[in-house]
Amino acid sequence: MQIQNNQTTYYCYNQNSNSVNKNSSSNSFDINLENEENTKKPTSKMIEYLERKGKFSSLSEEDEALFKNILEDGVFSANEMKRLSYEQIQVFSDMVNFAKNYNEDNPISKDDFPPYLLSSIGTYLSSEKTNNHSFNKALYETVKNIQNDKDRMAYLDAINSALGFNDNQGYGQLPKHIIDNMIKELNKLEKEKYKDFENPENLIKDYNNWEIKDYKNFIDNLKNSYKTACVNSALSIETRAMYQMFYQNTLTLEENYNQIQKETKYA
């Protein structure tokens, strides 16, 4: 608004407008410069921080240019995720990992905290997502091609929930004693839930067996549960549509997983 007012003043005066024109140009330049610097603040903080730590030094010129381009606005979007291969996302996510950078820096005050990169995809899907490389890569290749942001977030939430303690970016990163206590409480709840049923031992889920050892079977079970849910007439139309979306994406996850397993086998 200030710039528009200055411009109006300039056009309203002729002979006496020189000083007004100079002030207007100067003010406009200062405002534009200030706006430009404000826009660059998130970018310069993240990029300058990584440069100061030498994080770009081991990258190829192409990867360095790509990563800096992605970091320009301080937000990691779904479209930017599509530009990265699985191998690149591992390097990228490691570079911008707030917890890792925090532990390396050991800051004394909040002012010394490393910059935080916002993400619109919910997770960076690193190679440490689970202890299974093929599943991690298959999940990344699946999720990055989900077009709708809400669908992507909902699907990731469903996967994270299904992984439980196997999710190293979720419950799996909790200290062991906390996980052990949670398992005890969950087992108690299961026994209470089915205490009045016949043969409760056939219904009770044993949370001690939380570790996923066969991810092919895990994906297959997910697929079947979503397939059943999406045709369950007891559920609302919206809920069934959500499970249909989960089912379709899990079919893709299964295809990606099988392909990666095949490539690994014959590598």
Image (cartoon, rainbow, N blue to C red):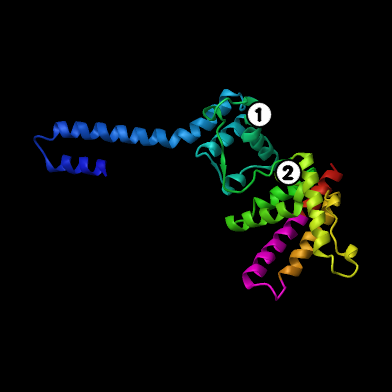
Q: Residue at x 83, y 65 (%)?
A: 194
Instruction: Work out how far the residue at label 1 is from the one at label 2, CA to CA, in angstroms.
Output: 19 Å
Residue 250 picture quarter: bottom right
Would you place residue 27 above or below residue 259 in this image? above
Q: Which residue is mark 2?
A: 129
Would you place residue 182 above or below residue 239 in this image? above
Q: Which residue is mark 1?
A: 103
Using residue 146 as the reference point, say whether residue 216 is left or right of it.
right
For the residue marked with disc 1, what is the amino acid? Asn
- Give how far across and how far down residue 265 sits, in percent: 86, 45
Residue 37 picture quarter: top left
**Which circle's residue, 1 or 2, is located before the other in the chain?**
1
Quarter of the image with the N terminus is top left
Secondary structure of residue under mark 1: helix
Q: Are marks 1 and 2 in contact (CB under 8 Å)?
A: no
Range covered by the magenta-colored residues:
231-254
Q: Nearer the viewer, residue 62 or 190?
A: 190
